[in-house]
Amino acid sequence: MTQTAAEIARTHPQPAPIAAYAIVAASTRMRARRRRHWLTHLALLLICTGFILPFLWMVSTSLKLNQQTIEYPPHFIPSPVVPSNYWTVLTHEKINFPLFARNTVIVAALTVFGTTFSSALVAYGFSKIRFRGRGVLFAVMLSTMMIPFPVTMVSLFAIFRWLSDHTAIQFLGTFKPLWLPAWFGSAFNIFLLRQFFMTIPDELSEAARIDGCSDLAIFLRIILPLSRPALAVVALFTFMNTWNDFLGPLVFLQRPEHYTLGLGLQAFQSQHGGTEWNLLMGATVLTILPVIILFFLTQRTFIQGIATTGMKG
Amino acid sequence: MPLSRHESASLAKGLLFLSPWLLGFAAFTALPILLSLYFSFCDYSLLQPPVYIGAANYRELFRDPLFYHSLGVTAQYSLMALPAGMLVSLGLALLLNQGIAAQTVYRSIIFLPSLVPAVATALLWLWIYTPDRTGLLNYFITELSLHTSNGAAWLVKPHLILPSLAFMSLWGVGQTVVIYLAGLQDVPRELFEAAEIDGATGIRRLWHVTLPMISPVIFFNLVMSIIGTLQVFTIPYIMLDVTGGGTDRAGYFFVMYLYDNAFTYLRMGYANAMAWVLLLLILSLTALAFWSSKRWVYYQGR
């Protein structure tokens, strides 16, 4: 027998006033919330304007004539608009933007490729193979994340210098000190990938093992294909970090023809900084652009990746 | 206890997979740290092999006014940038977490500046902080104060250098905001509803529900910020380059002095002594944070 609503109301008299109270409370809450939302939007709009302004100012400056950059009051819309500044930057003999961009891409590509593969290999060992001492090694690896580059850079420089003097291979004055260490995995990436591999059920690899697959085959044919999102996060973060790195290239690169974009920009600024702000901002826009485009193309992967880094608790 | 055949087989296999990291750890982390400790007891100019001189570097370091000065600059900056960054990023995350429309748009805008390379950030803000009234910031100050003030020479006046650097560091809080936001979105809804039924108002809900629930995330961000602010280098190096840390070296950070000792004065031994001081500082501050976390970090289900 099904009860009608009226019957329920008759046999269960108490819920009615509570429900009515709840509806009233909910509607005042809703009204308060809507008012609060309106204020939140206002606050966020103001804050976001503040966050965007420096970008707009940079683009605006990069499209001005040089004498316009020091006008008072400043104009946000340049007149005339001078897009040819970008052409000047790209062909400027002092900044040599195409060469620096090429150098940065070479270092970034070698770093991304090397660290993604090697970190995945190590993360497999930390997540899918049980062996004695694994926990201790993992703790050691995590603690190396706290050691910043400035602590080791001086002796790393000495090591690469020694290697250059005592082996047939040149290290200093080449890109090798920048990308070679990445080929041995990086603690942060290993950690991130290991967390992801832990979520892949062991039954999959066990089944493959019974079928006679080696661990290497399981890693290459099962784990890697299933981990594309995590691998993408690692590749993306590494690319960004390499693109943004300044201190590493400053320490290890010596000749201007090896400069990355960061070093090139800094060199250009210290030679022409006070005078040609339009060109300097143009070069800055061009340096930032790849990173911003990449972010918009991969936004979801990116934000999720950042969010999970804080989730280790 | 000897390992069984199966155990030693899996140990060999595990170490094989770990071998890239084991090699890399030995060559690019353990060796440099140990070498750095050794060099810190040496006179070492790179041009000649290191000569052991005992604790002379450390004795000199602890009498070096510039060492204390650069340490003080770093500490002052951290005391401004770290709390400000923590508060602003948490505040922004709370604002974004109100369940409003267009949340992802706001989030992207706030996140974007944190992707900008440090060199680009430094140059852009150098331009914004331009000392005369053509600087963007000074222009706004002039307009908003109805021409009663012309702003300031932000990166020239010694007492303004560190606050200016700390202020611009807020432009890059985006990553921290996203991490906080993820933490906030993980707080179970029932907790808020229960608190609301119990009559807890906004502030009390924040203090008694939200903050304890995201305290592990706050802790994570705190440790990362401590490690980050102690090694600030690129931005002051570029913005205050010509003047070597600005007027009166008011923006001469610890790592800038370390870098100069190593690569400008070629005093590798002295620089390595500084590197070890930096390492010990980071380790002890992190240890302090971990020790204090027992009192204020709440782990669910533990």
Image (cartoon, grey):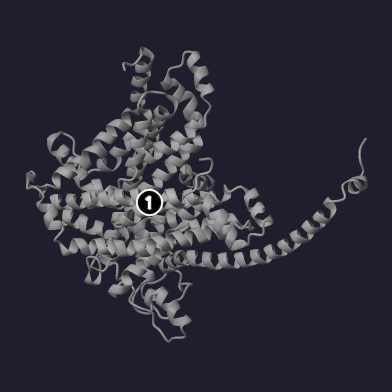
Quarter in which the N terminus of chain A is drawn: top right
Please indicate whether residue A229 sits to the left or right of residue A148 in the image.
Answer: right
Q: Position of residue B256 (x, y in %)?
A: 24, 58
* Chain under numbered label 1: B
Which residue, given by chain and number where applicable, does mark 1 sit on? B289
Q: Nearer the viewer, residue A265 or B150?
A: B150
Q: Residue at x 79, y 58 (%)?
A: A21
Within-10-Å neighbours for mark 1: few <14, some 14–19, many 20+: some
Quarter of image, res A187: top left
At a point 23% along the width and 62% down the height, the residue shown is: B70
As displayed, is residue A61 above or below residue B60? below
Q: Is residue A294 above or below residue B137?
A: above
Q: Is residue A2 visible?
A: yes
Kindly tell me whether residue A88 is visible in this rendering.
no
Which residue is pictured at 7% across the width and 45% down the height?
A: B52
Q: Looking at the picture, tell me which residue is in the foreground, A129 or B155.
A: A129
Which amino acid does the dot numbered 1 rest on? Ala
Q: Position of residue A200 (x, y in %)?
A: 52, 29
Report the side of B287 relative to B111 (left or right): left
- Seen from the viewer's position, the closer of residues A7 and A142 is A7
On screen, residue B161 above or below B15 = below
Q: Quadrant of residue A283?
A: bottom left
Number of marks in the rendered image: 1
Determine the secondary structure under disc 1. helix
In the displayed structure, does residue B211 sit left or right of residue B260?
right
User: Quick one: A47 or B223, which is closer to the camera?
Assistant: B223
Q: Position of residue B51 (x, y in %)?
A: 6, 45
Q: Is residue A11 above or below residue B69?
A: above
List x then y, in percent, for residue B88: 47, 62
